[in-house]
Amino acid sequence: MNRMDVDVAVIGTGTAGMTAYRAAKAQGARVLVIEGGEYGTTCARVGCMPSKLLIAAAESAHAMRHSAPFGVHAGEVRIDGRAVMERVRRERDRFVGFVLESVASFPEQDRLRGHARFTGPHTLLVDEHTEVSAARIVIATGSSPLRLPALADGGPGVVTSDDVFYWDTLPESVAVIGTGVIGLELGQALHRLGVRVKLFARGGSIAQLSDPEVLRCATRVLGGELDIQFQSTALGAVQEDGQVALTVADALGGESTERFQCVLVAAGRRPNVHDLGLEHSGLERGPDGIPLFDARTMQCGTSHVFIAGDANDERPLLHDAADHGKIAGDNAGRYPDVRPGLRRTPIAVAFTEPNIATLGASYRQLCAGGARKFAVGAVSFENQGRSRVMLQNQGMLRVYAEFGSRRFLGAEMIAPRAEHLAHTLAWACQMRMTVDQMLDMPFYHPVIEEGVRTALRDLSRCLAAGESDVDAADTEPGT
């Protein structure tokens, strides 16, 4: 049995783990990173980047099919599924390569391969070959896609988002279980690439939206293109003649069976904390098995253990994982001098078309616990100038502000190029700007951002009039 003694052990080499390693090293600590799986972040290997490659191909096909209203007539669109997936895999591997180079730059003595498990508050056993004694530990083990027990008999045709980016070609048909960000992004992309797609949602949710008006708009807009069955439950799946027979119950309990080449389970991801021997760590854990932690410091209770990235399930997004890792690594490196780190304004984007984006405080958060009412401003993009020019005039934006201070609080939207609108608004939110200060900013013409100005003007009017269309009890859209 090998033995190692270090100041900080970081479990996991994803975005959070690599960032934590660098931060702890910068504090002068002796740091070891431990990895039980493949090097390469979730984002690079099976997440953000390969999904955007698939979406980019889908956008190209969609633009060719819908150019006639501009007076531009393309020929027959032919989708070469093998070529599409070959580019996705090739470019994905390029992004993964950058990550591998980054890990390889860590000194060899700072890297250890194998699955780590706690054997005590300060000790880890790695694959039965090495015992690591660490004064401080950072858990950065990431997450894995959920698999539904009800679909266990579906055979190899039942896949998760992690499997999609290893396909050699596009399937003929896909059932997507889930209308969260992953399910919607992949479902719409596959549909636009000529795959027969049907989406099934357990409830009435769309991505991360909680504002009932924006949710209704998103349901209408996306439902106009995609076959979405809400209030449905996947009951079972069996492999039959190379296809998956999927049985689903609707809201009234009626059952139906339909066959697809693949069933893509996009029902969320689960933090990888359930095979770490946490029962030996001395940490207090919540009902979900995740150690209780302070989101400002990433510290688990008052202990020497920190948790970062998807493993803590707080904001499972790459930019937040990087922030988590920086905070956890800093604090692990200088422990017991634990300090709050920089937490940025929340921002989340679904790269559907139109984009779906949220930032700052969500509608549900602002309504939580019967909190005092807040003002809401809105704009529809149906008649917004630049949107109509591009024939992308769908969606709506709702913006929120606090009575009295007139401070901007957040927004939810489904809108053309919302990925850019969301950044502009998130910066304003983090700078704690008032609606008046935001309206003093420059707005060029003609741009999508003019829609933001329209919504802010509506919000200013509602603030001045003391008006709010918000019922604090109305916090469960889609039910």
Image (cartoon, rainbow, N blue to C red):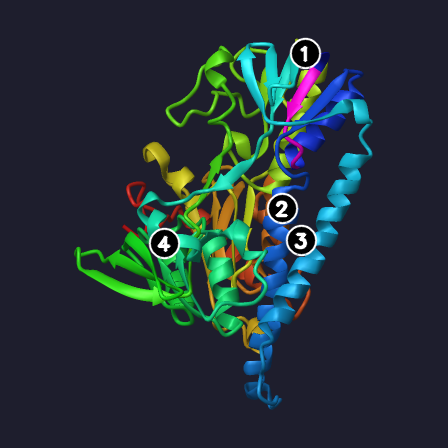
Q: Earlier in the sequence, mark 2 or mark 4?
A: 2
Q: In 3D space, how far apart are the residues under numbered discs 3 and 4 (Cα atoms)?
A: 55 Å
Q: In 3D space, how far apart are the residues under numbered discs 3 and 1 (Cα atoms)?
A: 43 Å
Tell me where residue 238 appears, x and y as whole percent: 32, 56
**Is label 3 in a helix, a strand or a loop?**
loop
**Is label 2 in a helix, a strand or a loop?**
helix
Can you see residue 475?
no
Check residue 43 in the rendering and tell me which mark sits there, or answer none: 2
Disc 3 crowd, CA 10 A, few/some/many (<14, 14-19, 20+):
few
- Horizontal side of residue 411 vs 344, given as left or right: left
Q: Which residue is mark 3?
A: 441
Can you see residue 222?
yes
Q: In 3D space, how far apart are the residues under numbered discs 2 and 1 (Cα atoms)?
A: 30 Å
Check residue 335 in the rendering and tell me which mark sits there, or answer none: 1
- Horizontal side of residue 226 vs 80, given as left or right: left
Q: In 3D space, how far apart are the residues under numbered discs 2 and 3 (Cα atoms)?
A: 34 Å
Q: Nearer the viewer, mark 1 or mark 4?
A: 4
Q: Earlier in the sequence, mark 2 or mark 3?
A: 2
In this picture, which residue range is highlighted in magenta? 8-14
Q: Nearer the viewer, mark 2 or mark 4?
A: 4
Disc 2 crowd, CA 10 A, few/some/many (<14, 14-19, 20+):
some
